[in-house]
Image: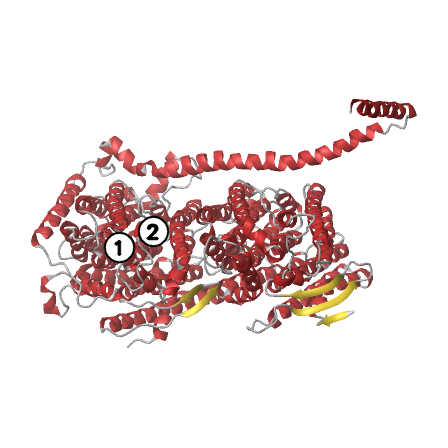
């Protein structure tokens, strides 16, 4: 039964997979496959930007918009719906996925091995991620969450390098382990007395929210079940070790998608489900999230310093930066006064900005690797003279990563720190040391890779071609745009997060 | 009256020339890179015009309150961007855009033929825009934004010749060390936000700078939102940022290394403007600092210590730019000390005169480099014959730095010394006394290193320039080793005066180094139409007006005996240097080297670089701490993961081995099982 149908989100989610099907059945020849994949990615980018652009930010606007709601499995008492809708929290993430999907396809231009299959997996991956970011039904959300594993596993294990089978398997097992926890949580939520629904809109509305009465697993237990699932994905220390391996051995496009959007699923889940559906527990355990966050920030940064592989270095820096998401969420634990949306908005912004920044870093590293055939930093050096475009892109991404004002990273970090400092001052100061360390590892990496004396072997390197430069430019424009005019995103995030903050302020007992 | 648009244009014009040079000329018209220079100079010329217009408007007392616009509003954190135009801002605008304009003209000659000419002007424009934005900011976060942007422009310009390892390393070092200080600045901002509700209750914005001033006043209507120990920590947080930027001990080590950048960059950024941003920052929050005697004490003592400490290292450097770099750190120490003692106007006055004479000294060094190809004074000498104009200008700037009446530096330095002696600030008397002694001793040291530098560079016999340097380096060092002090990429010796595009800006700065003193103290001032104590009164009144004071700020009267004391100190330093250097027997040796242990300690920079870089960073942090964490990550955290994987793989194999398919084995198992059950039942 159709309970509301707008269609835009369905199109955004399923366009890539339909494209993949057409690719499989109709398109022949590597060139055509590539062109067609670009076309599909471009189409999905336009659709996702439409979602972002048409999203009504006005004061009286509905919280959830573009509702596609179809009754799905009512007969066996499962009550699961096909429900795609977005509020201010996931709208920017949909746009992010569109942007990075486009970049990933363009970055795969030179793939020459099993080309058709490669692009099919890439497009399936995009559908899965889009699905995660738009499903507001727990079961559907879980299906998309699991669906994403298969293409990523294939991309790493077939088109990767190094110990690719090991890394792909490690990625798979870690995530499935997290999913197992999450699934238990989902079932327990459904079975809770008086719930009997997977509808995430209802579950995060104060009146219909889960209460502690008569639960099989206490609320705190549910909170942690979901938390583990998302913390592995984010990833948070100590569940992070799959990430450096997966990144190092994945092909460029997979790294871009992995760092750019897949990690964001973890952060999104934390905000949407842990904060949105378990506000009292978020308040109760905010300190623990801050501790984990600060440990991730510092531990990640310190380990980053030691890395000699460019991709591993960026992977570890991601752990450090994703720690800030937890620190931002920790702002919920304020001791007095009213909770404001600042810290949560910072956490959400961090998802978006880190997606663009790290996406750009991986794109640039991919170009370096294509040409020099090494990612081992001591073997590199002086590349700026031969590859100025790549060097500039890398520098801008690096500066955004270390939180330079005028670029996107600064805004999210500032908001995280402003929010968290009100709740936990000393832990926030510790997390601030992360930005000094970030300056250290980013600038040292730039020095060793792009500056200094160039080895004669690199004298004939070429700079990025037009196709290669296009995604770089796309990301640079986004990074500078968000840095200069952050309200473009923060206002949207705020419209999604404010209802959560209202609920939190009602629930928090001081 | 100056319009709001004109003030914004001061900042936007160089930003536009940055965009033009970086996005249009560099990618598409790189062959015509001269356009970048011309556009930058045109933009800065206009910006200077608007700056002077603004200054005039402020002098005339026009009301220059403008509504800020909202940049970001997130959950009670309202971050605005606006213009704060007071005497401090107006003076800084003219200094920054003026020196920048002159340096850009000079660079036309100095950077001529550099392959990255457009990139150079793009960076220089970006820097100037950021610096002007910093000066204009009315919001502490806006100020922080530009604060970091000047930092990154400095990074880009120090590492401008990025193929040179020393330049790339120096750029990184500068950014990281200043960022350590910035952590304090950010904590101060974060603290302000925790008080946002109290600010809002008083109708104030926690990030708006004049509102922060007001909140710090104990008798204000807002009821001292900021006060007590917290106020001290807030001020010290801001000071940490200022100390990083202004090279105050112990965060000074980046500034001498920053000389790896092109010399005009050193003149503009690492002498005249950016490094003075720390002084500006403390001055900007002076109403907050003033309320905490403890914070003021720290500022005064750190400044005084830095003044004498850095000057002592300037005594032994062989690189002419490094002498000047230590001199800059030392002079910034004077300004900080002055602020700590409550001498707001004197500190800024010294900032202004210093900008003129120190920029001139650096441009002079660039001119010398243009002729000799080196910065190493051991290979210079006798240059006054070949570069007479440069020589005269460097002597004027040098004597201004030393503080010889009637040059600019004399008046501003004397103002600081006199104020320190009077000791009317919020700090204890002993702080004033200690500071005064350090600063007076600093005058002797300053005089010595300045005259040493002039004699080594311009007097005696010419000692061969870059050609000789390379020759000797090739003999003593293995092939391919790069010189630690490097040179600016000006190959070859051609002993001649620099072209007029380089000389002309120097002449203008020379006039400044001569005459800027007349903005303040001289008794015969009024006869030439400038009110007595004009600049100090102007700045002091601006500060008073910010706090709602009526009437005029106190200004210091010229003191004959203080002038005598400082002149005697300066002359004794000069005399000593002349005695030691002018008629030394061995032209090639530095007589100071005979004081072996002391000379080594100073030329090793008190081993601070060794301590920071080798001991703390490389060994302590990188090798041991990060190494351990990394080991834990690979072996314990990831090891557990692999162990679990190994366990399940092998437990499968082990259990699999039980499935032998032999009925006897199964039967034995079943028999033992039954036996166990029976036993269990019997025992229960």
Residue nearest the viewer, comparing A310 with A124: A124
Q: Is residue B30 visible?
A: no
**Mark 2 sits on what residue?**
B230
**Mark 1 sits on what residue?**
B291
Residue nearest the viewer, comparing B462 with B101: B101
Q: Is residue A278 above or below residue A301?
A: below
Indicate the position of residue B679 as horizontal and vertical percent values. Answer: 81, 22
Crowding at mark 2 (Cα within 10 Å: few <14, some 14-19, many 20+): few
Q: Secondary structure at mark 2?
A: helix
Which residue shows up at 12% across the image and 69% down it?
Answer: B528
Residue nearest the viewer, comparing B216 with B515: B216
Q: Residue furthest left?
A: B560
Tell me, yes or no, whether dots 2 and 1 are on the same chain.
yes
Q: Secondary structure at mark 1?
A: loop
Crowding at mark 1 (Cα within 10 Å: few <14, some 14-19, many 20+): many
Would residue B309 appear left or right of A491 to someone viewing this image?
A: left
* Figure coloring: secondary structure
Would residue A147 appear left or right of B657 to someone viewing this image?
A: left
Q: The disc numbered 2 marks a residue on which chain?
A: B
- Mark number for residue A214? none
Indicate the position of residue B649 as horizontal and vertical percent values. Answer: 75, 34
Indicate the position of residue A199 as horizontal and vertical percent values. Answer: 70, 61
Contact flag, marks 2 and 1 (Cβ < 8 Å):
no
Q: The disc numbered 1 marks a residue on which chain?
A: B
Would residue B455 appear left or right of B176 to someone viewing this image?
A: left
Q: Mark 1 or mark 2, which is nearer the start of the sequence?
A: 2
Would residue B508 appear left or right of A14 to someone viewing this image?
A: left
Q: Residue furthest right?
A: B663
């Amino acid at each position: 039964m159709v309970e509301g149908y707008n269609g835009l989100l369905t199109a955004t989610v399923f366009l890539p997979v339909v494209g993949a099907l057409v690719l499989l059945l109709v398109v022949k020849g590597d060139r055509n496959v590539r062109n067609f994949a670009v076309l599909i990615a471009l189409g999905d980018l336009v659709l996702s930007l439409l979602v972002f652009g048409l999203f009504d930010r006005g004061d009286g606007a509905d919280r959830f918009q573009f509702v596609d709601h179809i009754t799905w499995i009512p007969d066996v008492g499962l009550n699961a719906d096909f429900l795609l809708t977005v509020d201010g929290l996931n709208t920017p993430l949909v746009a992010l996925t569109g942007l990075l999907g486009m970049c990933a396809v363009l970055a795969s231009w030179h793939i020459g091995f099993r080309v058709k299959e490669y692009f099919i997996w890439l497009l399936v991956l995009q559908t899965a991620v889009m699905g995660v970011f738009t499903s507001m039904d727990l079961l559907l959300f879980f299906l998309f969450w699991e669906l994403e594993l298969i293409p990523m596993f294939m991309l790493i294990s077939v088109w990767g390098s190094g110990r690719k089978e090991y890394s792909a398997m490690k990625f798979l097992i870690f995530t499935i382990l997290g999913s197992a926890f999450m699934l238990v949580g989902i079932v327990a939520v459904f079975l809770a007395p008086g719930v009997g629904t997977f509808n995430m809109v209802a579950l995060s509305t104060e009146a219909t929210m889960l209460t502690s009465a008569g639960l099989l697993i206490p609320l705190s237990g549910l909170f942690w079940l979901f938390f583990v699932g998302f913390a592995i994905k984010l990833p948070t220390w100590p569940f992070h070790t799959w990430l450096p391996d997966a990144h190092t051995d994945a092909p460029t496009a997979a790294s871009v998608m992995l760092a750019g959007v897949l990690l964001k699923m973890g952060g999104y889940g934390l905000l949407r489900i842990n904060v949105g559906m378990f506000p009292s527990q978020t308040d109760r355990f905010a300190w623990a999230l801050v501790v984990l966050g600060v440990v991730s920030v510092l531990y990640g940064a310190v380990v980053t310093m030691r890395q000699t592989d460019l991709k591993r270095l960026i992977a570890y820096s991601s752990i450090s930066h994703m720690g800030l998401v937890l620190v931002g969420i920790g702002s919920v634990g304020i001791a007095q006064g009213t909770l404001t949306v600042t810290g949560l908005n910072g956490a959400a912004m961090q998802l978006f900005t880190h997606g663009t920044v790290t996406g750009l870093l991986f794109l640039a590293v991919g170009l370096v690797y294509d040409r020099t055939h090494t990612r081992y930093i001591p073997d590199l050096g002086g590349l700026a003279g031969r590859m100025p475009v790549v060097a500039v892109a890398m520098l801008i991404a690096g500066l955004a990563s270390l939180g330079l004002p005028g670029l996107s990273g600064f805004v999210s970090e500032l908001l995280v720190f402003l929010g968290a400092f009100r709740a936990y001052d000393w832990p926030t100061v510790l997390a601030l040391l992360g930005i000094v360390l970030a300056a250290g590892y980013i600038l040292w990496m730039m020095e060793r890779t792009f500056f200094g004396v160039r080895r004669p072997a690199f004298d004939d390197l070429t700079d990025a071609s037009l196709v290669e430069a296009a995604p770089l430019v796309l990301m640079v424009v986004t990074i500078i745009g968000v840095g200069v005019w952050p309200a473009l995103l923060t206002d949207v995030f705020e419209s999604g997060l404010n209802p959560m903050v209202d609920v939190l302020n009602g629930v928090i007992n001081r | 009256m100056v319009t709001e648009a004109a003030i914004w244009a001061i900042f936007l014009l160089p930003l536009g020339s940055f965009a033009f040079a970086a996005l249009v000329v560099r990618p598409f018209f790189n062959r015509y890179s001269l356009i970048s220079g011309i556009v930058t100079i045109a933009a800065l010329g206009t910006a200077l015009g608007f700056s002077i217009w603004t200054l005039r408007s402020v002098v005339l007392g026009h009301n220059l309150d403008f509504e800020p616009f909202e940049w970001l509003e997130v959950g009670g954190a309202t971050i605005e961007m606006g213009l704060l135009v007071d005497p401090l801002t107006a003076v800084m605008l003219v200094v920054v855009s003026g020196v920048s304009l002159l340096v850009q003209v000079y660079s036309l000659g100095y950077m001529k033929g550099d392959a990255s000419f457009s990139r150079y002007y793009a960076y220089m424009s970006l820097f100037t825009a950021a610096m002007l934005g910093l000066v204009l900011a009315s919001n502490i976060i806006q100020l922080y934004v530009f604060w970091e942007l000047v930092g990154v422009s400095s990074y880009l310009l120090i590492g401008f010749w990025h193929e040179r390892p020393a330049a790339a390393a120096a750029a990184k070092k500068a950014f990281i060390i200043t960022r350590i200080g910035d952590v304090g600045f950010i904590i101060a901002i974060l603290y302000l936000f925790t008080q946002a509700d109290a600010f809002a209750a008083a109708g104030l914005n926690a990030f708006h700078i004049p509102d922060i001033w007001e909140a710090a006043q104990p008798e204000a209507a807002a009821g001292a939102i900021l006060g007590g120990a917290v106020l001290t920590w807030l001020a010290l947080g801001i000071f940490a940022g200022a100390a990083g930027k202004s090279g105050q001990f112990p965060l000074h080590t980046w500034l001498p290394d920053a000389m790896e950048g092109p010399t005009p960059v050193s003149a503009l950024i690492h002498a005249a403007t950016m490094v003075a941003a720390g002084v500006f920052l403390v001055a900007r929050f002076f109403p907050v600092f003033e309320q905490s005697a403890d914070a003021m004490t720290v500022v005064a003592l750190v400044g005084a210590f830095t003044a004498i400490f850095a000057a002592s290292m300037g005594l032994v450097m062989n690189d002419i730019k490094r002498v000047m770099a230590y001199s800059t750190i030392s002079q910034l120490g004077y300004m900080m000390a002055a602020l700590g003692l409550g001498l707001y106007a004197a500190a800024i006055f010294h900032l202004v005169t210093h900008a003129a004479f120190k920029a001139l000294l650096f441009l002079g060094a660039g001119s010398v480099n243009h002729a000799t190809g080196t910065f190493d004074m051991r290979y210079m000498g006798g240059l006054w014959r070949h570069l007479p104009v440069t020589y005269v200008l460097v002597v004027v700037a040098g004597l201004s730095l030393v503080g010889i009446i009637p040059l600019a530096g004399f008046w501003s330095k004397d103002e600081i010394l006199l104020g320190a002696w009077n000791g009317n600030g919020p700090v204890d008397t002993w702080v004033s006394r200690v500071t005064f002694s350090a600063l007076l001793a600093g005058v002797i040291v300053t005089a010595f290193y300045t005259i040493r530098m002039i004699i080594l560079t311009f007097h005696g016999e010419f000692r061969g320039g870059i050609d000789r340097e390379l020759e000797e380096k090739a003999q003593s060092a293995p092939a391919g080793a790069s010189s630690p002090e490097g040179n600016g990429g000006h190959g070859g010796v051609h002993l001649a005066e620099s072209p007029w595009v380089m000389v002309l800006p120097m002449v203008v700065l020379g006039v400044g180094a001569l005459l800027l003193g007349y903005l303040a103290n001289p008794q015969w001032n009024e006869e030439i139409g400038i009110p007595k104590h004009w600049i100090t009164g102007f700045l002091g009144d601006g500060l008073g007006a910010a706090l709602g004071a009526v009437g005029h700020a106190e200004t210091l009267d010229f003191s004959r005996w203080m002038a005598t004391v400082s002149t005697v100190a300066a002359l004794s330093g000069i005399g000593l240097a002349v005695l030691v250097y002018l008629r030394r027997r061995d032209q090639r040796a530095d007589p100071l080297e005979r004081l072996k242990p002391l000379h080594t300690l100073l030329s090793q920079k008190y081993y601070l670089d060794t301590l920071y870089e080798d001991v703390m960073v490389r060994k302590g942090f990188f090798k041991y701490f990060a190494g351990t964490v990394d080991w834990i990550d690979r072996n314990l955290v990831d090891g557990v993961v692999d162990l679990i994987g190994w366990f399940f793989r092998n437990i499968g194999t082990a259990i699999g081995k039980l499935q032998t398919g032999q009925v006897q084995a199964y039967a034995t198992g079943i028999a033992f099982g039954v036996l166990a059950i029976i036993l269990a039942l019997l025992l229960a």
